[in-house]
Amino acid sequence: MAREVLASPDYEKIRRLPHHDASVADHSVAVAYASYRIARRIGLRSRLPELTRGALLHDFFHYDWHSEKPGSGGLHGFDHPKEALRNAETTFGPLSALERDCVVRHMWPLTAIPPRYPESFIVCFADKAVALRESWNALRSGKGIGVL
């Protein structure tokens, strides 16, 4: 499941997009790794493949959010989860309910509806922790974090 995502030519697109101090792909892999470790640590092991795949796809958008807007024309923070879901399902086919929830709910509480599953809440939390670390690294290196 995760190998299919990582080996996809469409995933290569997000390897070239900047995200804080890394690429969108690097960020997504870091979120997947952190989510996996948290879930194992607290004993949520039965759905690890779906959690990992959802985390890898949570930011599967194909634009530079520092200088462009999502296809909807709205604000990146609010609209990129839906665009990531559309891209993921176009590329990989229908996602499971858990994978979909990981993708569309990862920006909570910025977006109104909280994650439905414990695993998608873990992805939401891991995304915030990884983004905070990446933003701190970018600020320390003098890159800035860029906000759109």
Image: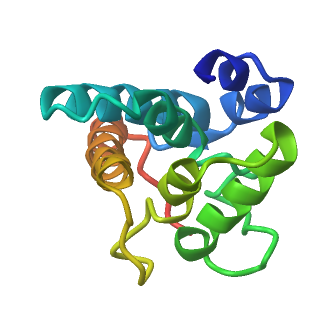
Horizontal side of 128 relative to 113 (left or right) equals left
Near-viewer residue (8 or 64) = 8
Q: Which quarter of the image is occupied by the C terminus? A: bottom right
- Asked which quadrant contains residue 15, the reply is top right
Horizontal side of 107 relative to 5 (left or right) equals left
Residue 93 vertical placement versus 112 (above, below): above
Residue found 44% across the figure and 78% down from its top: 111
- Asked which quadrant contains residue 39, the reply is top left
Horizontal side of 85 relative to 143 (left or right) equals right
- One can see residue 22 in this view: no
Q: Which quarter of the image is occupied by the N terminus? A: top right
Near-viewer residue (48 or 112) = 48
Residue 24 vertical placement versus 108 (above, below): above
Point out residue 19 in the picture as x, y percentages from the top left corner.
53, 43
Near-viewer residue (120 or 43) = 43
Q: Residue furthest front?
A: 46
Colour scheme: rainbow
Point out residue 100 in the picture as x, y percentages from the top left corner.
59, 55
Residue found 82% across the figure and 69% down from its top: 71
Query: How many numbered circles does the render carry?
Result: 0
Point out residue 64 in the picture as x, y percentages from the top left corner.
70, 51
- One can see residue 26 in this view: yes
Residue found 71% across the figure and 51% down from its top: 61
Residue found 17% across the figure and 31% down from its top: 43
Point out residue 40 in the picture as x, y percentages from the top left corner.
22, 26
